[in-house]
């Protein structure tokens, strides 16, 4: 996670040396620039080369044996797909839904788990535990639990007289059912980040507010929320990126179905790759890259704009 | 929020992408070095690997076959290897072929999927083999490449794509095998009145949804004899050919009449087999091959399940759509002693001992693909039904064996129609779009 966080702050490159200093620029840092070479080599081979060749191959029709240049046709086909329209909508719904639920629920849990309550450490572990479980495992487990006829969830609801929804097999609600599972699994990480943010707020503020007669709620609204802003920004950014790129949970639970009802861009790309439409799926990846950047870059800038004058 | 995990996944994907792109960028498969295992100790001893599917019946068959083959050829050791089915298996086969890592002998589909692995470039032709003349003609036609050469030996038995039905219910209600679609729908009505689910669907396992369309091809061809050629050339489409459109419409009709089983959206293949074997549902449009599993999910019920073709409009052309088995292939990278051993293995599967070993692991679901092999006497009812349609000439191969194009999203589109997300007509139009991508990927003329 540290690496992802790194992208939201300033890059780890030393500032440009002011004019008049030595040409070697040693004052920028204690180490010579060639220390960067090993990292740069790995980054180039594993990241830059595939990214740039990916851009190239998105303009071709290729299989494992050969490739032909076809210009923008892959993009045309990709945008004409019915699954893509559904996928685009689902991706946005899914990202917004999971990210906002994680922020709200995560914040409430964090406030609860920083208060002086019984078994606090134990409860913190319980909340965090789902984060450690394999996503595919979570997906398969919940697929069984959410079976409309035989699943434990609907059977339990039946005992108290409620007819449960048909979670994953109803095209209208499948994507929301998966979203709920995603929140269940991911809220622990949000909570931990919030706890860290809240714990780092000096207690003087709360004491001062208490002396002035502020209620608990007032303290939360005017001290906790504003001072936990960096934590909130981090959680929003991370969960939104995660939601936009969502694939594994959806693939494990519905495979994008019923029909195409719970497809996201990620699953559309994967299915095209599976079908052997390599050029098309490469073009899809480029589109996904642009979409994520178009949403995340301005959002990060907006969320972090006050950080300096805090 | 699972950023660290997704990060790792994307790194892995990136690495994978690099590797595949480097290969695509022009390394010829042969230059990667063949996987020579230093097994050259004793003179004449050869080791080859046999790659096959990973279902229970596949694995059991492979074991029995290797054992029988070892007894007949003590100098050759065959190593057993299995791979997943479906699209994952397709990717594995393509990747291994392009990197020169493929097993010496492997099982893979014939028909349109075979064309996608470029047999002319990657496989050893088998026209010169002595057993070619014993093969079934539909098998030969669907295992040839565009250059007219045969690239595979026979694997498995033929199977039909039609309707599995519960024989005791048919007897109890006094129903007859329907010769037309209207008769089929009338039977459904009777069954529904008797309080039983008329038609089983199992969308929990998506591929099982396609039979209404794929199994209807015999009827399409009866009305439009040159459909396959016109379709491959991009001149005829599902949406604008009334005969081809029927299959999609049928799904819609059965759905709207309320004939599906209650849990059709979440049931899986084995649930469906169990239902039809125990009479909880009566019709299950399916591949005949799945009956091999009846004994596992509903012991003792094999002879309660019969099989008939999906009926069309004309009783005179009532007949079965057939899947002519699978192929046994040798990649071009195999040479010398290993090639001879691999050819011997393929030949073994055209002999009665080979077929018997195969039948030991997976009960036959139709006739064998070579005239050298006879079916055992105790085959299931569904296999007997299949055989009778094939022997009386009332059968034709499925579209995927006559045309190299088959859209990958047919199963999802059938489910869209079956869950009322789109109409049958719209489903057919969506499928035509899906097929277009496959045709373009194969570089067929008339599709740009």
Image: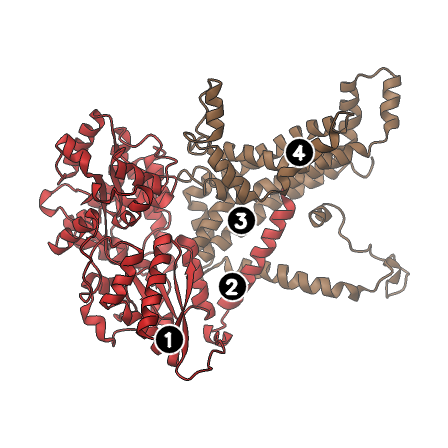
Residue B9 x %, y % = 59, 52
Quickly name the residue at label 2: B20
Q: Alpha-carbon neighbours of circle 3 within 10 Å: few (<14), some, or many (≥20)?
A: some
In the image, which is nearer the foreground, mark 4 or mark 1?
1
* Image vertical order of residue A292 relative to residue A187, above or below: below
Residues under labels 3 and 4: Cα distance?
Answer: 35 Å
Instruction: Identify the hue of chain B.
Output: red
Side of A162 where A293 appears, left or right = right
Where residue A254 sits, quadrant-wise, is: top left
Residues under labels 4 and 1: Cα distance?
Answer: 58 Å
* Image vertical order of residue B367 relative to residue B2, above or below: below
Quickly name the residue at label 1: B76
In the image, which is nearer the foreground, mark 2 or mark 3?
2
Kindly identify the residue that appears in the image at 67 percent across and 38 percent down.
Answer: A189
Residues under labels 1 and 2: Cα distance?
Answer: 34 Å
Quickly name the residue at label 4: A127
Q: Alpha-carbon neighbours of circle 4 within 10 Å: few (<14), some, or many (≥20)?
A: many
* Image vertical order of residue A56 relative to residue B283, above or below: below
Residues under labels 4 and 2: Cα distance?
Answer: 40 Å
Question: Is there one chain holding both mark 3 and mark 4?
Answer: yes
Question: Is there one chain holding both mark 1 and mark 2?
Answer: yes
Kindly identify the residue that appears in the image at 61 percent across and 30 percent down.
Answer: A101
Question: Is there one chain holding both mark 4 and mark 2?
Answer: no
First in sequence: mark 1 vs mark 2: 2
Taking depth in this image into account, of B74 and A145 the one nearest to the observer is B74
Chain coloured brown in this rendering: A
Residue B178 x %, y % = 14, 38
Name the disc covering residue A287, or none: 3
Secondary element under disc 1, as helix, strand or loop, is strand
Residue B290 x %, y % = 29, 48
Residue B24 x %, y % = 49, 66
């Amino acid at each position: 996670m540290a690496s992802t966080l790194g992208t939201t702050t300033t890059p780890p490159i030393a500032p440009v040396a002011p004019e008049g200093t030595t040409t070697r620029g040693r004052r920028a840092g204690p180490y010579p620039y060639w220390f960067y070479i090993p990292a740069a080599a790995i980054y180039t081979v594993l990241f830059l080369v595939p990214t740039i060749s990916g851009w190239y191959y998105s303009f071709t029709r290729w299989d494992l044996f050969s490739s032909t240049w076809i210009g923008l046709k892959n993009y045309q086909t990709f945008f004409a797909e019915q699954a893509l329209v559904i996928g685009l909508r689902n991706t946005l719904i899914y990202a917004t839904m999971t990210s906002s639920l994680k922020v709200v629920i995560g914040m409430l849990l964090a406030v609860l788990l920083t208060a002086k309550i019984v078994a606090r450490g134990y409860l913190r572990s319980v909340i965090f535990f789902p984060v450690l479980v394999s996503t595919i495992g979570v997906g398969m487990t919940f697929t069984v639990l959410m079976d409309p006829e035989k699943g434990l969830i609907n059977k339990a609801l039946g005992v108290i007289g409620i007819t449960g929804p048909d979670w994953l097999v109803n095209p209208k609600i499948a994507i929301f059912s998966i979203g709920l599972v995603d929140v269940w699994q991911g809220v622990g990480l949000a909570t931990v980040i919030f706890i860290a943010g809240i714990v780092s707020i000096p207690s003087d503020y709360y004491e001062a507010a208490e002396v002035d007669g502020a209620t608990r709620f007032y303290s939360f609204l005017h001290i906790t929320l504003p001072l936990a802003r960096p934590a909130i920004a981090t959680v929003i950014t991370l969960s939104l990126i995660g939601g936009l790129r969502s694939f594994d949970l959806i693939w494990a639970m519905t495979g994008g179905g019923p029909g195409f009802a719970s497809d996201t861009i990620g699953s559309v790309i994967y299915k095209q790759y599976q079908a052997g439409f390599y050029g098309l799926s490469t073009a899809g990846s480029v589109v996904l890259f642009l979409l994520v950047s178009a949403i995340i870059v301005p959002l990060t800038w907006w969320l972090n704009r006050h950080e300096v004058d805090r | 929020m699972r950023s660290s995990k997704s990060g790792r996944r994307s790194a892995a994907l990136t690495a994978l992408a690099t590797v595949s792109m480097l290969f695509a960028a022009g390394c010829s498969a042969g230059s990667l070095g063949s996987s020579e295992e230093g097994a050259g100790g004793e003179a004449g001893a050869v080791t080859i690997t046999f790659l096959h599917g990973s279902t229970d019946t596949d694995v059991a068959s492979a074991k029995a076959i290797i054992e029988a083959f070892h007894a007949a050829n003590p100098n050759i050791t065959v190593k057993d290897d299995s791979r997943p089915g479906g699209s994952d298996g397709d990717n594995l086969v393509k990747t291994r072929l392009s990197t020169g890592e493929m097993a010496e002998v492997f099982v893979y589909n014939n028909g349109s999927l075979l064309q996608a692995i470029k047999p002319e470039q990657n496989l050893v032709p088998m026209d010169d083999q002595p057993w070619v003349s014993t093969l079934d003609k539909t098998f030969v036609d669907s295992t040839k490449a565009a250059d007219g050469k045969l690239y595979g030996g026979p694997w498995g038995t033929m199977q039909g794509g039609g309707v599995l039905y519960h024989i005791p219910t048919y007897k109890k209600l006094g129903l007859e095998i329907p010769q037309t679609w209207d008769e089929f729908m009338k039977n459904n009505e009777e069954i529904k009145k008797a309080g039983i689910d008329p038609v089983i669907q199992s969308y929990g396992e998506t591929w099982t949804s396609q039979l209404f369309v794929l199994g209807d091809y015999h009827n399409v061809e009866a009305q439009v004899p040159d459909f396959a050629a016109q379709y491959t050339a991009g001149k005829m489409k599902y949406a604008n050919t009334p005969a081809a459109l029927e299959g999609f419409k049928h799904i819609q009709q059965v759905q709207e009449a309320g004939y599906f089983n209650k849990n059709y959206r979440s049931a899986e293949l084995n649930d469906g087999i169990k239902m039809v074997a125990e009479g909880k549902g009566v019709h299950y449009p399916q591949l005949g091959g799945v009956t091999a599993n009846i004994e596992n999910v509903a012991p003792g019920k094999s002879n309660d399940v019969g099989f008939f073709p999906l009926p069309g409009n004309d009783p005179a052309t009532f007949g079965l759509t057939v899947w002519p088995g699978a192929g046994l292939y040798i990649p071009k990278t195999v040479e010398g002693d290993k090639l001879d051993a691999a050819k011997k293995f393929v030949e073994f599967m055209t002999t009665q001992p080979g077929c018997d070993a195969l039948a030991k692991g997976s009960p036959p679901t139709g006739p064998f693909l070579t005239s050298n092999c006879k079916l055992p006497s105790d085959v299931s009812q569904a296999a007997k039904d299949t055989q009778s349609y094939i022997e009386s000439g009332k059968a034709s191969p499925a579209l995927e064996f006559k045309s190299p194009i088959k859209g990958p999203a047919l199963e999802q589109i059938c489910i869209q129609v079956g869950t009322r997300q789109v109409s049958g007509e719209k489903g057919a139009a969506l499928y035509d779009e899906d097929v277009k991508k496959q045709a373009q990927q194969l570089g067929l003329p008339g599709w740009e």
